[in-house]
């Protein structure tokens, strides 16, 4: 049988194919790019976005200056939510073809959304120079002026736009917002009603009016508008969603659930609605229902990765870290730049202590998503954990600006303000967080502490008692309740609170300090206090903090050898605590055994060159004996071994600050390192405050000293430093009160005579 293709015919076919291929590659570039563009337009009509994108990219590859193709590509990216790529393309079009006003205006819109107001204004003006009556440019200018609070300029711009297009409902909507910003509410309402009159089929017009009424607290009008909106658009879920949003703002959770459910009934295949209802349930603590809805959203397949990321975040927030990680890794394996999954990754970084990595990741994301409040909250968490309080507060304020109802952001801000001694503001933020989420325990605790620190003791007692009933094993609540009873002069109740705390956490040295104070106030003698402490150590033998307390008691009982033995034990148990080093050095110096101690430390270093404790001991002895340069050198060598060793950083920072012409910048760096490592150590907080004070930063110093006083009220030198900072701020009366409290404690401290003389001077000024 004769074959269908001979060798000869195969060769002929091969030649023809080569010719066809060559002829296809040799076309005119202008014709080729036009062909790709035309194909893209066909795909767009057929709603085949991915294919259209490929053809437009092919056209641009042939001619990078093909502005029409870039314009269409930018619009496609915008449609698909790829904002960064959309901005890049439209910005390029605006450069290539300034006559494409739509591209130029959209570029200006991107600038405005990114808070680049000057760039936005410059770009808008480029259009208005060519077309002074361009309504879209004028509308955007009105929005820009409104954002900057220039209401008259905004009104002038929108009125000019309306003169060019009086029948455009969108412009009346903008005018309504401008007039509302001017607080001309009657005219604002009329403008918004005019927008509906011009186009009552556009849901956005009804939505804007409802939002206006909601902001004005005109509840009945807002409800009527939303109900009318729901009746006009029965197949749309959005009127019900807006009703739910209104309900949440008024803490009407039952009504919110009803409207969320109605929205989902209107569009049961809408995955985003399922996610919204799931988030509502999660907020209400109904975790099983939330999880089920997240899973249903994933099964719908629409924006599957987004739904998976939401579920991963839900798992993370509920402590199901393994499940969260599996989902996160799965998403990122398919789509490495997925924003929701990367947000969860940033949270994992913070959980694992990689705060700087989290900041790098979130920082890159905020450039692409400048209006995503959650990113700024995560950024604030990382800064807070790094003890960068100012940066944390800035990030939280931005998160709240973007999302005023962001309860977690208000709650964390309240906590930071509380730590800085801004008690009244802290109370307001905590109250706001609780209004948004009544189940926010941290906000409730912060509010109660704010009430305590503003000396509203009866209210504080009631609040802490209620919290204790809900979480009876929370030591922070018990400690705060104990402090409240101490302030109310109810020692028996205070003792009960601290005893409960110590049963739960026997190594809590801070709580035991207050317990000793109560015993001393009740008439306990020194030996009784020693016995109490030894008994407590029996319950927590590995507590370095309790050992320090015992050493202090033996020293006060004039038993320095026993105290020295105990301080050395404390150093072994808690090598990061600077106090036992300093106390050991003080005893050895008083006993005249400095040479012996120095020899022992040097012998130890000969055997163990990286024995940080030996350098700390040497530093303390040199400091006590006035050999400041040798002390600094010892602390510096400790830091060479471990750059973030808090005791060495703290002591060296103090010595530099006290030196004539000392490098206060270096002292600040070291003090901040120390506080970052030990944020609750009163001595370290005091050092940072003292460096701020020496630098003339009195408000920062006052903030640190207030924290130190809160943590260790029985140290008069801390109040003395606080008084100095208050005086430096010009708060003379408050400074005098603090000095009076300092001297009323009737406890010895090195600067006591100086403080008494200063008090007299201030009173006579």
Image: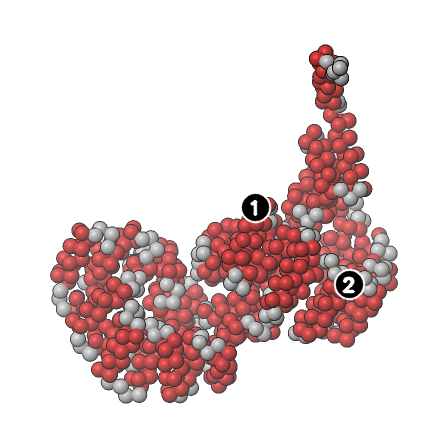
Q: Residue at x 72, y 32 (%)?
A: 59
Element assignment for label 2 = helix
* Badge 2 or badge 1: first in the primary sequence: 2
Q: Closest to the observer: 661 or 121?
A: 121
Residue 289 drawn at (x, y percent): 63, 67
Q: Quadrant of residue 588?
A: bottom left
Q: Residue at x 72, y 67 (%)?
A: 261
Which label is found at residue 333? 1
Q: Is residue 730 above or below residue 630?
A: below
Element assignment for label 1 = helix
Residue 262 drawn at (x, y percent): 75, 67
Residue 241 drawn at (x, y percent): 73, 65
Question: Which quadrant is the C terminus positioned in?
Answer: bottom left
Is any atom of residue 695 visible in this view?
no
Q: Residue furthest front?
A: 1
Q: Quadrant of residue 603?
A: bottom left
Question: Which quadrant is the N terminus positioned in?
Answer: top right
């Amino acid at each position: 049988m004769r074959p269908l293709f001979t060798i000869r015919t195969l060769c002929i076919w091969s030649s023809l194919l080569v010719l066809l291929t060559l002829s296809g590659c040799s076309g005119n570039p202008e014709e080729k790019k036009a062909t790709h563009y035309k194909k893209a337009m066909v795909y767009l009509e057929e709603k085949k976005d991915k294919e259209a994108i490929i053809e437009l990219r092919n056209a641009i590859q042939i001619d990078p200056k093909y502005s029409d193709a870039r314009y269409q590509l930018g619009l496609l990216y915008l449609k698909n939510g790829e904002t960064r790529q959309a901005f890049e393309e439209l910005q390029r079009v605006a450069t290539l073809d300034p006559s494409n006003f739509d591209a130029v205006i959209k570029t200006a819109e991107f600038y405005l959304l990114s808070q680049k107001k000057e760039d936005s204004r410059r770009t808008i003006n480029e259009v208005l120079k060519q077309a002074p009556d361009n309504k879209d440019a004028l509308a955007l200018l009105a929005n820009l002026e409104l954002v900057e609070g220039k209401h008259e300029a905004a009104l002038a711009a929108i009125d000019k736009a309306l003169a060019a297009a009086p029948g455009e409902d969108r412009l009346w909507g903008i005018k309504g917002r401008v007039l509302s910003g001017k607080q001309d509410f009657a005219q604002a309402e009329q403008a918004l009603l005019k927008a509906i009159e011009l186009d009552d089929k556009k849901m956005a017009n009804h939505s804007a009016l409802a939002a206006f009424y909601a902001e004005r607290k005109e509840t009945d009008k807002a409800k009527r508008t939303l109900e009318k909106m729901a009746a006009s658009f029965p197949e749309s879920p959005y009127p019900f969603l807006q009703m739910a949003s209104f309900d949440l703002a008024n803490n009407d959770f039952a009504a919110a659930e009803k409207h969320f459910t109605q929205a989902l009934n209107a569009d049961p295949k809408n995955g985003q609605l399922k996610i919204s209802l799931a988030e509502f349930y999660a907020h209400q603590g109904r975790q099983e229902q939330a999880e089920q809805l997240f899973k249903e959203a994933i099964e719908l397949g629409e924006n599957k990765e987004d739904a998976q990321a939401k579920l991963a975040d839900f798992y993370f927030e509920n402590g199901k870290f393994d499940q969260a990680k599996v989902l996160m890794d799965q998403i990122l394996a398919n789509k490495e730049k997925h924003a929701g999954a990367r947000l969860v990754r940033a949270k994992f970084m913070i959980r694992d202590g990689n705060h700087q990595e989290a900041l790098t990741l979130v920082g890159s994301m905020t450039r692409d998503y400048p209006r995503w409040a959650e990113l700024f909250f995560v950024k604030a968490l990382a800064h807070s954990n790094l003890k960068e309080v100012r940066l944390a507060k800035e990030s939280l304020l931005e998160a709240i600006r973007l999302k005023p109802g962001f309860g977690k952001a208000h709650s964390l801000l309240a906590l930071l303000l509380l730590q800085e001694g801004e008690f009244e503001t802290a109370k307001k933020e905590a109250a706001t967080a609780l209004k948004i989420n009544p189940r926010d325990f941290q906000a409730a605790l912060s509010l109660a502490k704010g009430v305590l620190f503003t000396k509203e003791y009866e209210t504080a007692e009631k609040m802490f008692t209620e919290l204790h009933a809900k979480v009876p094993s929370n030591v922070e609540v018990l400690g705060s309740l104990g402090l409240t009873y101490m302030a109310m002069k109810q020692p028996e109740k205070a003792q009960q609170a601290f005893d409960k705390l110590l049963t739960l956490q026997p190594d809590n040295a801070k709580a035991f300090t207050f317990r000793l104070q109560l015993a001393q106030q009740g008439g306990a003698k020194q030996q009784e206090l020693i016995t109490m402490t030894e008994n407590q150590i029996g319950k927590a033998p590995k507590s370095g903090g309790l050992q320090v307390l015992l050493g202090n008691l033996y020293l006060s009982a004039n038993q320095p050898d026993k105290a020295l033995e105990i301080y050395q034990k404390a150093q072994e148990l808690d090598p990061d605590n600077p106090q036992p080093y300093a106390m050991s050095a003080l005893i050895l110096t008083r006993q005249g055994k400095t040479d012996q101690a120095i020899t022992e430390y040097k012998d130890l270093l000969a055997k163990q060159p990286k024995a940080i404790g030996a350098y700390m001991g040497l530093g303390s002895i040199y400091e006590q004996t006035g050999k400041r340069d040798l002390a600094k050198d010892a602390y510096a060598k400790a830091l060479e071994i471990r750059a973030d060793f808090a005791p060495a950083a703290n002591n060296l920072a103090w010595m530099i600050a006290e030196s004539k012409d000392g490098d206060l910048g270096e002292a600040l760096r070291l003090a901040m390192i120390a506080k970052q490592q030990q944020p609750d150590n009163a001595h370290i907080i005091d050092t940072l405050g003292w460096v701020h004070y020496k630098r003339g930063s009195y408000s920062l110093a006052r903030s640190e000293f207030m924290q130190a006083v809160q943590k260790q009220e029985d140290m008069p030198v801390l109040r003395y430093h606080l008084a100095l900072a208050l005086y430096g701020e010009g708060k003379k009366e408050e400074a005098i009160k603090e000095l009076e409290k300092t001297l009323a404690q009737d406890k010895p401290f090195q600067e006591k005579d100086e403080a008494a003389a200063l008090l007299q001077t201030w009173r006579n000024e």
